[in-house]
Image: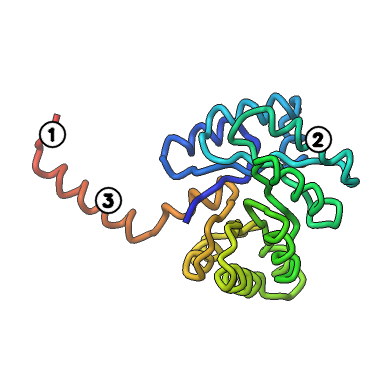
């Protein structure tokens, strides 16, 4: 499973990229707005830090304007994945961009039927929002299982990118289901490293080592 981080915070991206665990980045207009900087500049800088896909989202809602935005975003760097919404105009744009060889991330997916349409439109990634489904009393992870099965049935190349991840259990369950990518907030990625027994064991090892009075260096 690949890990993308869902942020536009450049310091966070640099810090986590140093772990070797960051395979890509997803952004959206809300995340970039928090930086107070130019959207295009932030996206370009992120693309220079992370070699994997960097999702940059269109803000237009009509196909013609969305396509122009997507083409402009795709020129920022070769690893840009243009993000479009799962609407009729978004899928038209997805088809047009994918025909040009541009990676497209179709976002705001909430049903298996929508995911099927995105794959047929040539999406490189489909982004089902599991946390938002959980918020309204549905099982977001059930959607992931359905999409993984459907894509497997037809050998679609579209990767399942689990979005709106709220905690480590979403990541683990998605990995067990065979999802390709999880995009997670920096906090969640850090939580994947943590376990109280790891901390307890390390403390015990260090205490025993300290009693020896030795040094490796």
Q: Where is 91 relative to 175, above or below?
A: above
Q: Residues within 10 Å of mark 3 (few under 14, many from 20)?
A: few
Residue that carries the numbered disc 3 in the rendered image: 203
Residue 21 in the image: state x and y as whole percent.
Answer: 44, 45
Q: Nearer the viewer, mark 3 or mark 2?
A: 2
**Which mark sits nearer the N-terminus, 1 or 3?**
3
Left or right, residue 15 beside residue 133: left
Element type where label 3 sits in the image: helix
**Which mark sits nearer the N-terminus, 2 or 1?**
2
Q: Residues within 10 Å of mark 1 (few under 14, many from 20)?
A: few
Residue 22 in the image: state x and y as whole percent.
Answer: 49, 43
Q: Nearer the viewer, residue 202 or 193?
A: 193
**Which mark sits nearer the N-terminus, 3 or 2?**
2
Q: Quadrant of the C terminus?
A: top left
Q: Where is 128 relative to 143, above or below?
A: above
Q: Quadrant of residue 134?
A: bottom right
Left or right, residue 18 beside residue 57: left
Residue 157 in the image: state x and y as whole percent.
Answer: 57, 58
Q: Residue at x 67, y 60 (%)?
A: 119
Element type where label 1 sits in the image: loop
Mark sitting on residue 216: 1
Residue that carries the numbered disc 2 in the rendered image: 69
Cα separation, mark 3 vs mark 2, equals 53 Å
Q: Residues within 10 Å of mark 2 (few under 14, many from 20)?
A: some
Mark sitting on residue 185: none
Q: Quadrant of residue 101?
A: top right
């Amino acid at each position: 499973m690949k890990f993308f981080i869902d942020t536009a915070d450049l310091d966070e991206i640099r810090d986590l990229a140093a772990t070797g665990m960051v395979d890509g980045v997803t952004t959206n207009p809300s995340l970039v707005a928090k930086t107070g900087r130019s959207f295009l500049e932030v996206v370009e800088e992120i693309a220079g830090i992370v070699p994997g896909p960097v999702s940059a989202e269109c803000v237009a809602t009509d196909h013609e304007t969305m396509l122009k935005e997507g083409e402009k975003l795709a020129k920022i760097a070769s690893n840009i994945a243009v993000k479009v919404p799962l609407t009729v105009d978004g899928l038209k744009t997805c088809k047009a961009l994918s025909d040009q060889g541009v990676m497209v991330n179709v976002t705001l997916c909430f049903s298996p039927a929508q995911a099927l349409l995105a794959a047929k439109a040539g999406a490189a990634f489909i982004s089902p929002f599991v946390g938002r489904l959980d918020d309204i009393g549905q099982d977001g992870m059930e959607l992931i299982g359905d999409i993984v099965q459907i894509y497997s049935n037809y050998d679609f190349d579209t990767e399942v990118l689990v979005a709106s991840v709220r905690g480590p259990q979403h990541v683990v369950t998605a990995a067990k289901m065979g999802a390709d990518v999880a995009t997670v907030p920096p906090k969640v990625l850090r939580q994947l490293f943590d376990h109280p027994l790891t901390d307890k064991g390390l403390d015990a090892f260090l205490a025993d080592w300290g009693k020896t009075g030795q040094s490796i260096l």
